[in-house]
Image (cartoon, rainbow, N blue to C red):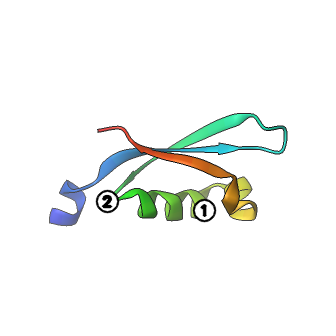
């Protein structure tokens, strides 16, 4: 239960093949977990994990 209390909102910014900046938001414990969730749930990021250029905590 305490695990869920420590979740924070993170925005994962990434660039597509046209160099357009896009973003996804996730609740995670830290930036690494936010990156892991982005790779898991975003097919483009899954295929291009190095397209992530910023992970920001929104807290």
| Residue 2: % across, % down | 15, 64
Q: Is residue 46 above or below residue 15?
A: below
Q: Is residue 43 visible?
A: yes
39 or 1, which is in the foreground? 39
- Position above or below: 22 against 44: above
The numbered disc on residue 55 is none
Left-right relation of 40 to 9: right
- Specify the quadrant that holds the C terminus: top left
3D distance between C-alphas at marks 1 and 2? 16 Å
Residue 6: quadrant of the picture: bottom left
Numbered circles on residues, count? 2
Q: Quadrant of the rendered structure where residue 57 is?
A: top left
Q: Residue at x 51, y 59 (%)?
A: 35
- Vertical comparison of 22 with 34: above or below: above
Residue wearing tag 2: 29
Report x, y in % for residue 4.
23, 59
């Amino acid at each position: 239960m305490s695990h869920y209390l420590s979740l924070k909102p993170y925005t994962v910014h990434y660039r597509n093949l046209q160099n357009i900046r896009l973003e996804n938001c996730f609740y995670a414990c830290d930036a690494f977990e936010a990156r892991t969730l982005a790779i898991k749930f975003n097919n483009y990021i899954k295929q291009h994990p190095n397209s992530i250029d910023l992970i920001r905590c929104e807290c």
